[in-house]
Image (cartoon, rainbow, N blue to C red):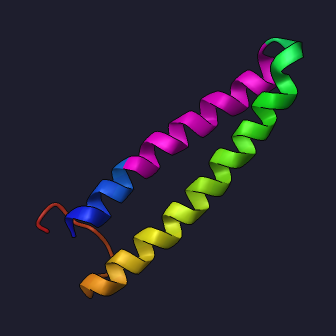
Amino acid sequence: MRTARYTIDVMRHVRALTSATASLASHGDPAARSELADAALDLKSALDRLHEARDQLLKAAGAERVTDAD
């Protein structure tokens, strides 16, 4: 369960990075917008894979979600 909890922590950080990157892609330096938009898509893809990893970890632990009691 600890690994699932760490995965969720990483997911929170990636979500924040994705949001910040998307914001910069929309409002930042026009010369960097394309690269930032690509980075936001890459982060979204990584987040999707982290969701899958979390689900597999929870399944292996026989749990449906991570709780503070775990």
Vertical arrangement, residue 8 with respect to residue 26, above or below: below
Q: Position of residue 57 (x, y in %)?
A: 35, 76
Q: Residue at x 45, y 51 (%)?
A: 11
Main SS category, magenta section: helix
In the displayed orientation, state which residue is furthest to the top: 29
Residue 15 sits inside the magenta stretch: yes
Q: Residue at x 44, y 40 (%)?
A: 13
Q: Quadrant of residue 3?
A: bottom left
Q: Is residue 33 left or right of residue 9?
A: right
Q: Position of residue 17 (x, y in %)?
A: 55, 34
Residue 67 sits inside the magenta stretch: no
Q: Position of residue 67 (x, y in %)?
A: 21, 66
Give whichever of 19, 14 is nearer the camera. Answer: 14
Q: Quadrant of the N terminus?
A: bottom left
Q: Is residue 21 left or right of residue 7?
A: right
Q: Is residue 65 left or right of residue 20?
A: left
What stretch of residues is rendered in magenta? 10-28
Total marks placed: 0
Q: Position of residue 20 (x, y in %)?
A: 61, 28
Q: Quadrant of the C terminus?
A: bottom left
Q: Quadrant of residue 36?
A: top right
In the displayed orientation, state which residue is furthest to the left: 69
Q: Is residue 63 left or right of residue 26?
A: left
